[in-house]
Image (spheres, grey):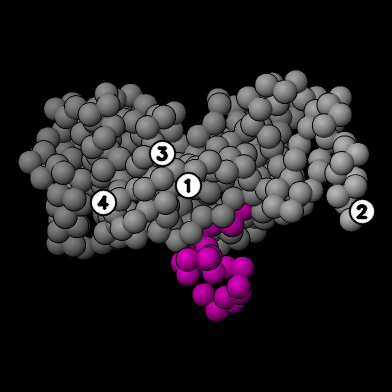
Amino acid sequence: MSQMTNETLANNGRMLFIECDNLVKIYKVADLEVVALQGLDLLVREGEMMALVGPSGSGKSTLMNILGGLDFPTAGRVRVGTHNLLDMTSRDQVKYRRHMVGFVWQQTARNLLPYLTARENVELPMALAGFPGRERHERSKDLLERVGLADRMGHRPDRLSGGEQQRVAIAVAMANRPAMLLADEPTGEVDSASAEAIFQALRTLNQEFGVTVIIVTHDMTVATRVDRVVGMRDGRTSTEILRRRDGDIAISEEEFAILDRTGRLQLPEAYIDALDMEDRVRLRLEPDHIGVWPEANPQGEMSSSDNQEAQQ
Ligand code: ADP
């Protein structure tokens, strides 16, 4: 990329791959407007494997559809690699979907053709993109081996378990060497052992091809399997769980609230409820933190001893 700025270099030296800045999506249904994304900010580094979690209706699918080039945002800024997604023609969008993105959907039927074998399913997108037969054959074998299905290549989907079908779907999504894999609830319909194998397949491809992976999930064990979990609420990113690693070993997990560029912060619902906070809060700047009190709580005001300290 020619216009590399400090902003596009993330702190660990990896390039920023996705930048969403104040992203807005409004759906118009008859006379009603539904604001699905309301000023969402998100940065994702190249080669990161991250998860999006959040209650139903918080905007996860809307964000995935925009990142996947299936839908246009209403306002804001969104860049993926060198593509500005707000400024694409329908033709650019088709190219973008074909070369940049691989999709894995929750419903296995949406991912695979039932009358083709696993290997033929993986070869199909390559055939449509014009890859020669030999390359298709080699790559489909290689991908199916990497997702642990070397002995299932000749099976049609109805001879595979749900989890195996999802792993074939992951291989299909990788067929045309996309820069990014988007997986919407890939483990939603399988048992926990199959879920483990699906996450493992995604991790293997992430590590071996450097593909950036974003997973929408309700699976609460996801935090142990990805680099970062971003929580969404009301059309915005609200929390992040980061894992600190020492080599391959995760040593701790820490939850953060997200502070956006204009200084907005969402307090966790449980904290607000616990202290009955409403409408307004008191803030106080301390040397190394900021205190937040309910409006009615006088502790948020400076006590007379604090005043004396401040005056000294
Ligand atoms: P999630 O994936 O987190 O469940 P969605 O992105 O599906 O959330 O939905 C966010 C909000 O946008 C919801 O209020 C939903 O009803 C609305 N929404 C999503 N898609 C459409 C659409 N095609 N038309 C109208 N409203 C939509």
Mark in the foreground, 4 or 1? 1
Separation of residues labelled 2 and 3 (CA atoms): 47 Å
Q: Does 234 sit left or right of 153 as displayed?
A: right
Which residue is at the front of the view, 46 or 299?
Answer: 299
Residue 242: which numbered mark, if any? 1
Asked if labels 3 and 2 touch by Cβ distance under 8 angstroms, the answer is no
Question: In the image, residue 220 lies at what x, y percent?
Answer: 41, 29
Q: Is residue 86 above or below residue 268?
A: below
Disc 1 crowd, CA 10 A, few/some/many (<14, 14-19, 20+): some
* Label 4 sits on residue: 204
Q: Residue at x 30, y 40 (%)?
A: 199
* Label 2 sits on residue: 311
Q: Is the distance from the Cβ of mark 1 to the nearest ligand 1 atom less than 8 Å?
A: no
Q: Residue at x 37, y 26 (%)?
A: 188
Amino acid bearing label 3: Ala
Separation of residues labelled 4 and 2 (CA atoms): 60 Å
Of labels 2 and 1, earlier in sequence is: 1
Magenta stretch, main secondary structure class:
loop
Quadrant occupied by the C terminus: bottom right
Q: Which residues are magenta?
A: 1-20
Q: Quadrant of residue 197?
A: top left
* Label 3 sits on residue: 223
Q: Residue 7 lies in magenta, yes or no?
A: yes
Q: Is residue 75 above or below residue 197?
A: below
